[in-house]
């Protein structure tokens, strides 16, 4: 162990003697390491933020809609009355079957008017979004088709300012609704871009009676009892709809949970791919280290001859030059890691405004920086070290 530390001390002294050359050599490692750390760290942080945003919506449903590419789409048109039939046929396999209409409506209150996304909901709440005040729809409110509404925080502020919105009346599409709940402030989350930060939710039964105006639902959302059985339950619902509308009726099933997982997987693949591209810079840096170590071997030929003549073994010479190469690589890699972490933190602060809280895997980043630095130094420092150890001591002394 004493010999190892002596080698380290000697390698540091050699690096310091040629500090300008060493700094230029480490520059490649700094650029390569910082780029990989920044890309990898940002992609992991963004993925964690997106996954957290999606998880706030809770269980994802199987979405069923008529295939628009079929010859006669009207044959497969989903009707409001189909909901009960599908729900009864699925039985315990589905927690809820909800219709959805894609629509924007004019909402007004207190002399303020807004055109917002109007969403329908039932008494089964799959999302984990917090309420600032009030509550979500109950079974009685949905079954009784009561004219109640839940609104997002920004709408409550727009319509009522700092005053409580509970019990206040709003007009949705010209129909009066009473506000029974307000979602917590979710600004700065992915919800804003997915569903729009300004949203009014009404019971689907109320929407059908008061706002749909005989317009059939655009699609059905089926929430399976087993979250892993989205596809199977969705296909079962399709068979029920085909039994109602005939075998010619064609439907599509979108597994929302699978789409979310695919989306996060794509982000991970993109991040890994970009990191691999950044790895080219590490290869270039490794070649630079190997080149400078070969120059060092040539410059220190006489020193190598003296060491071997007084008893230094090949292993000793290899260790001396390999440790020097690894220290060069570590110096550049750890400096690059510092810059990469700073870039990751800065990007995470910007992305958090859109994605919410992001998790930066600091331990993983440090581990990657250390492993790559040691690997580059060892791989590209081996050839110069072995070449130095193979020198004939007599020829080395004559040089």
Image: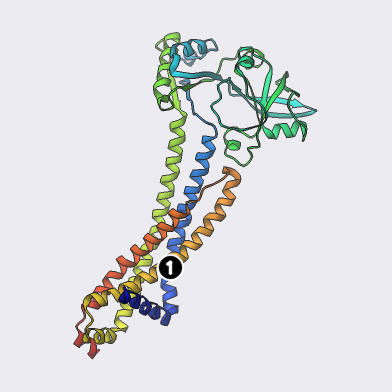
Q: What residue is pinned by disc 1?
A: 332
In the rendered view, would you say 332 is above or below 108?
Answer: below
Name which quarter of the figure residue 391 lies in.
bottom left
- x 56%, y 25%: residue: 125
Identify the coloring. rainbow
Q: Is residue 71 visible?
A: no
Lateral position of residue 223 relative to residue 296, left or right: right
Lateral position of residue 346 relative to residue 92, left or right: right
Nearest the camera: 348 or 1? Answer: 1
* Residue at the right extreme, as displayed: 111
Secondary element at image label 1: helix
- Answer few, some or many: residues within 10 Å of disc 1's Cα (few below 14, many 20 plus, some between 14 and 19): many
- x 43%, y 42%: residue: 266
Please state the total of marks drawn on the protein image: 1
In the rendered view, would you say 365 is above or below 172?
Answer: below
Nearest the camera: 18 or 213? Answer: 18
- x 33%, y 72%: residue: 323
Nearest the camera: 151 or 219? Answer: 151
Name which quarter of the figure residue 137 lies in.
top right
Say which quadrant the N terminus sits in: bottom left
Say which quadrant the C terminus sits in: bottom left
Q: Measured from the top left, where is residue 79 in percent x and y?
A: 53, 12
In the rendered view, would you say 397 is above or below 117?
Answer: below
Q: Measured from the top left, where is residue 32 in percent x and y?
A: 43, 62
């Amino acid at each position: 162990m004493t010999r190892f530390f002596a080698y380290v001390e000697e390698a540091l002294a050699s690096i310091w003697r040629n500090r300008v050359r060493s700094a230029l050599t480490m520059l490649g490692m700094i650029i390569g390491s910082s780029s990989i750390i920044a890309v990898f760290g940002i992609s992991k942080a963004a993925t964690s933020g997106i996954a957290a945003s999606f998880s706030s919506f809770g269980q994802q449903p199987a979405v069923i809609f008529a295939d628009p590419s079929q010859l006669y789409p009207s044959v497969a048109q989903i009707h409001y009355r189909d909901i009960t039939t599908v729900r009864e046929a699925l039985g315990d396999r589905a927690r809820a079957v909800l219709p959805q209409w894609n629509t924007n409506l004019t909402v007004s209150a207190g002399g303020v008017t807004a055109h917002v996304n109007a969403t329908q909901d039932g008494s089964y709440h799959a999302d984990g979004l917090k309420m600032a005040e009030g509550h979500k729809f109950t079974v009685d409110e949905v079954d009784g088709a009561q004219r109640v509404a839940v609104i997002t925080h920004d709408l409550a502020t727009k319509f009522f300012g700092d005053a409580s919105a509970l019990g206040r009346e709003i007009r949705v599409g010209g129909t009066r609704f009473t506000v029974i709940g307000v979602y917590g402030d979710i600004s700065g989350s992915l919800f804003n871009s997915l569903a729009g930060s300004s949203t009014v939710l009404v019971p689907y039964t109320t929407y059908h009676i008061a706002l749909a105006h005989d317009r059939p639902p655009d699609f059905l959302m089926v929430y399976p009892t087993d979250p892993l059985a989205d596809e199977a339950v969705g296909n079962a619902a399709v068979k029920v709809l085909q039994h109602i509308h005939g075998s010619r009726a064609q439907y599509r099933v979108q597994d929302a949970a699978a789409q979310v997982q695919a989306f996060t997987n794509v982000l991970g693949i993109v991040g890994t791919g970009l990191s691999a591209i950044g790895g080219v810079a590490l290869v270039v840096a490794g070649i630079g280290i190997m080149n400078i170590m070969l120059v060092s071997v040539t410059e220190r030929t006489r020193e190598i001859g003296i060491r071997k003549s007084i008893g230094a073994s090949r292993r000793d010479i290899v260790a001396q030059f390999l440790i020097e190469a690894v220290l060069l690589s570590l110096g550049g890699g750890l400096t690059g890691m510092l810059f990469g972490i700073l870039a990751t933190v800065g990007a995470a602060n910007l992305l958090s405004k859109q994605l919410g809280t992001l998790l930066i895997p600091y331990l993983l980043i440090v581990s990657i920086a250390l492993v790559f630095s040691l690997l580059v130094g060892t791989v590209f420092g081996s050839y110069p070290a072995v070449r130095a150890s193979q020198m004939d001591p007599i020829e080395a002394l004559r040089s």
